[in-house]
Image (spheres, rainbow, N blue to C red):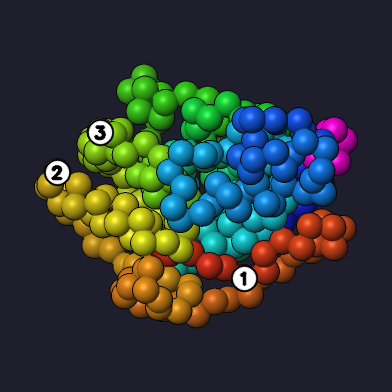
Amino acid sequence: MQELDQYLNWCDQMYSNTPHCQCGKACTNGNYCQGQMTNCYACINRVHRYTNTTIHYNCDKMVLYYVLKHGYRFGAEVFFEFQRAQRDLSQWNEMYVASIGCGPCTELFGSLLHWRTMGKQDAMYHYRGFDLELLWYPLMNQVRAFFPLDDVATYGQDAFDYYRGTQERIDVLVLNYMLSDMKKFQPAAFNCFLNNLTSLVQEKQVRFIMVNDIYLKISLEASRDLLNALIASRIRFGFSAGQYHGLNQFIGLYRKVMPSPSFTMPNTAIVNKYDPFRTVNSIQTIIRIQ
């Protein structure tokens, strides 16, 4: 997708032109950042440790490297998730997508590409991305620049507040690598979030919820919490769930193992420089509201 390649080029330029960070005691990986690093992936790995519940992204270079390493994979995962719902989506003439905790907005690229592959027009695709983490704001703002003629908007604002003040509808609600993150790092706020989410689903008559999440036990727990919250709110729905990876002691049986389709990474300069992940590897829940 041309826009994703442009986005990765921009991330590369920003990452390459920014001096090595000097995070000191604030570094997620001890003193690794003090002029010694060649890239930020060691710091990202520390954030991603299963046992970590306190250290989070805290560096602008880290989030740029995160997109360069994961961008193709995350976009592909969302593309394939939307593809699994194609029988319904192909009947739509227009689609309004809302992404809560959008971060680098990789779900925008995946969902819009799928919309295009169905022969739909960009003018009939609408995207709203929301994130309260300040580190993502430069990327969220830049994403809009790659879609100057399209209805693409990002907000450093609470999504629930935004939709309380607008008549805009939501057809597809996306939670992309967000649900487990909140359960892990903000457990006290998690149940309140689910209550607000189910209210939003009812209010806006959401048609689909697309959950794409990291391959960990806590992701499975968070997805089940969401399903239980929908049941408690008397929202009727059907769902399908699957995982791209084989079964292991962390995830248990998550409905089924899905085949891992291949995807292209046409920006060879980015591929050669950052060696981004080449296979999809997540758990997914597609919830169809009835």
Quadrant in the rendering for residue 61: top right
At 28% from the left and 34% from the top, the residue drawn is 188
In the rendered structure, the answer to whether residue 141 lies left or right of residue 237 reads right
Say which amino acid is labelled 1: Thr
The 10 Å Cα crowd at callout 2, few under 14, some 14 to 19, many 20 or more, is: few
Q: Is residue 57 above or below residue 165?
A: below
The earlier-in-sequence mark between 1 and 3 is 3
The 10 Å Cα crowd at callout 1, few under 14, some 14 to 19, many 20 or more, is: some
The earlier-in-sequence mark between 2 and 3 is 3
The earlier-in-sequence mark between 2 and 1 is 2
Q: Secondary structure at mark 2?
A: loop
Residue 100: image x %, image y %? Answer: 44, 39
> What is the spatial separation of the Cα atoms under label 1 and label 3, in whole angstroms?
34 Å
Name the quadrant of the N terminus. bottom right
Say which amino acid is labelled 3: Cys
Task: Find the magenta span and give its range.
Answer: 14-19
At 50% from the left and 32% from the top, the residue drawn is 131
Q: Is residue 157 above or below residue 91?
A: above
The 10 Å Cα crowd at callout 3, few under 14, some 14 to 19, many 20 or more, is: few
> What is the spatial separation of the Cα atoms under label 2 and label 3, in whole angstroms?
13 Å
Name the quadrant of the C terminus. bottom left
Residue 279: numbered disc? 1
Residue 233: numbered disc? 2
Q: Secondary structure at mark 3?
A: helix
> What is the spatial separation of the Cα atoms under label 2 and label 1, in whole angstroms?
36 Å
**Residue depth check, mark 2 versus mark 1: number of the one nearer the observer:** 1
At 25% from the left and 33% from the top, the residue drawn is 192
At 85% from the left and 63% from the top, the residue drawn is 272
Residue 192: numbered disc? 3
Say which amino acid is labelled 2: Ser
